[in-house]
Amino acid sequence: MKPLTKIHPTAIISSNAKIGSNVEIGAFCIIYDNVDIGDNTIIGPYCELGVANGISNGEILKIGKNSHIRSHSIFYEASFFDDGLVTGHRVTIREKTLAGKNLQIGTLSDIQGHCDIGNYVRLHSNVHIGQKSKIGNYVWIFPYVVLTNDPHPPSDTLLGVTVKDYAAIATMSVILPGTTIEEGVLIGAHSSVKGRTEPNTVYVGNPAKKACDTSKIKLQDGSEQPAYPWRKHFHRGYPEHIVKEWLKN
Amino acid sequence: MKPLTKIHPTAIISSNAKIGSNVEIGAFCIIYDNVDIGDNTIIGPYCELGVANGISNGEILKIGKNSHIRSHSIFYEASFFDDGLVTGHRVTIREKTLAGKNLQIGTLSDIQGHCDIGNYVRLHSNVHIGQKSKIGNYVWIFPYVVLTNDPHPPSDTLLGVTVKDYAAIATMSVILPGTTIEEGVLIGAHSSVKGRTEPNTVYVGNPAKKACDTSKIKLQDGSEQPAYPWRKHFHRGYPEHIVKEWLKN
Amino acid sequence: MKPLTKIHPTAIISSNAKIGSNVEIGAFCIIYDNVDIGDNTIIGPYCELGVANGISNGEILKIGKNSHIRSHSIFYEASFFDDGLVTGHRVTIREKTLAGKNLQIGTLSDIQGHCDIGNYVRLHSNVHIGQKSKIGNYVWIFPYVVLTNDPHPPSDTLLGVTVKDYAAIATMSVILPGTTIEEGVLIGAHSSVKGRTEPNTVYVGNPAKKACDTSKIKLQDGSEQPAYPWRKHFHRGYPEHIVKEWLKN
């Protein structure tokens, strides 16, 4: 075993799995053959990593270093997560999920696989990411949002959703198949969005309509400053060099 | 133990449970007394089958043969599933669920029991089926759909939803108490449906209104063929003799 | 060990945890250091109680007596539940949740912590309670309801939702940040509610509008009696002395 790595005696770990240094694996975990866990990563109890799907031929599940996967989470084989992945509890991640640095995935979120996710993306609790979704960098998706993909269900046609950098999709919105959420867009809570959008614009309603430029929304903290682009005032959890860049431009 | 049956040594299996031949039961499972698992069935890790509810007096949970229950799923006693049940992860199935052949239940779906489900029904992820629901054959229900039952909550009145053959209910729709979704109906995403519907008709919106005949919707695969009835073009996972019948009529 | 207490041999219990008399703890549970479980409580299998969050410095998780926590549930440290807590399966409860007597929390519900909940509150399945929520007594919240808190996400501003006594929020409704749901209000299914409400009033739609007084809604059980206030006819699960009071006034 690598230095400092601590595996709970009740955990079941394949001898083929590759486990880095200073990794903790909690009680009642199952780690299958084709898993590669980076250094300094914590895996909470009851996690099941590297589930086979009968299709991926044992391609590896790679979890980058400095990650934290919370308890009761399930990851299939054949996915890649760059460093600094952080999850809530009970996330379910299917095969062919390709994700950048420091992805955060909230409790109960369900990523259906076959999707691309950029750097520093935040998915809150109970988010559902359909297959063929493409998510940029610094995107926020809030609870109970669904990115769909079938324009006439059920069918064999999959038209994934695209979400570009800095966009934010509020609670319980449905993004319809093939829709593109442009850079800096804000989708209001409980909206249904279809088709094209314009950057830095607010869409609200079911069906969603253009409401205003995001710059029209003011912070409700007494400052009267604009709430968007959010990167001008909201920095929790981002590295210093990125925040510096945001404040410069 | 029956021939070829493999039970993980960490699983806790009641000696009263009836386990068929060539069954696999994963690590950390709990199988209680009144469970009957058919031949050639796979039960993933961390499943709990036959949970008592204090009401059903030990009536059995019957899982038909050739089934696959994925990890972290919970089934109560006193339900019946015909052959070929397939579930995602973390499904929760309460007592008195009566289901036909080859039911598929997606990850996180929650069936509240006291309901009837036909043959070849597909429930996608995170579907909530209220008590007293009646679901026909070949029905599709997509993520975050809820079938409700209380017309004036909270109360002791339960008016279940009925969904007839070949109907499809898209993502995040709520079907209100006592509603009947007729044969071949399509409910658009994020709709709220109440009352009566007409067969082979599209309903969309909150509240949902009649949009058009389902035959008006064309496939977005370049073929210009009608997308409904879906059974004319979508056949993945159905047995050959059924597909043959669909294509004949 | 206290009299009559039964801990499954596979459960992992910290010697620092305080476990009352006649407590049952199921298979594969993990009970951490700072947990205090009252007498006559049942903890189902696969539960994880007292999860540390790195902030709460080991403040205790107190579960009152006569409680029943169903399987696969996760509770963080630093919360308090008065007697008679009942949960479904897979609930996730973060730190600084303060709850009164006989709270019921349905399967998959997710309480984000830093919130106050009164006595005899019922949360159905898959309810999401955001931080800074304040919920009164005898409140009902139905499946897939979300209480939000960020008026311009993402931001550092948290404006919690307030829900007052006897209010009922039906399935798949979103309550927007800072909203107050007044006493006896009924929110119809699939609504989005923002701002102020009037007591004993029905709000429906997205965005929700005032529909009528709750007293206008009749029971659909043939009695022609008003359905609200619900406490005049719905008594399941409430103690006799409370029901007596309800029927008197």
Image (tube, coloured by chain):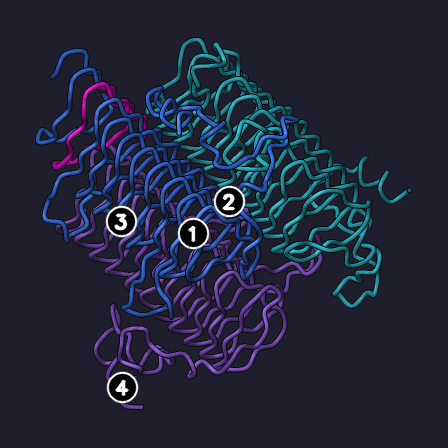
Chain colours: A purple, B cyan, C blue
**Magenta-tinted stretch:** C23-46
B45 shown above or below A21: above
Q: What is the distance, in whole Å, between disc 3 and disc 2 at their CAs?
A: 20 Å
Cα–Cα gap, marks 4 and 2: 43 Å
The correct choice, above or below, for B14 with respect to A33 in the image is above
Could you tell me which chain the residue with mark 4 belongs to? A
| Residue found at x 51% / y 44% | C170
User: Going by the picture, which residue comes out furthest to the right?
Assistant: B249
Report which residue position mark 1 lands on. C146
Q: Residue C115 carries which label?
A: 3
Q: Identify the residue position indicated by label 4 in the image.
A: A247
Residue lying farthest to the bottom in this orientation: A249
Residue placed under numbered mark 2 in the picture: C170
Q: Is residue A107 left or right of residue C76?
A: right
- The alpha-carbon separation of the residues under discs 4 and 3 comes to 33 Å
Please report, as a chain letter, where disc 3 is located.
C
In this rendering, would B221 be left or right of B69?
Answer: right
On screen, residue C52 versus residue B235, left or right, reads left
Instruction: Please tell me how crowded label 4 is: few (under 14), some (14-19), or many (20+) other residues with Cα within 10 Å.
Output: few
Q: Nearer the viewer, mark 4 or mark 1?
A: 1
Q: Is the magenta stretch mostly helix, strand or loop?
A: loop
Q: Is residue B165 above or below residue C96?
A: above
Residue found farthest to the front: C249
Q: Can residue A13 be seen in this view?
A: yes
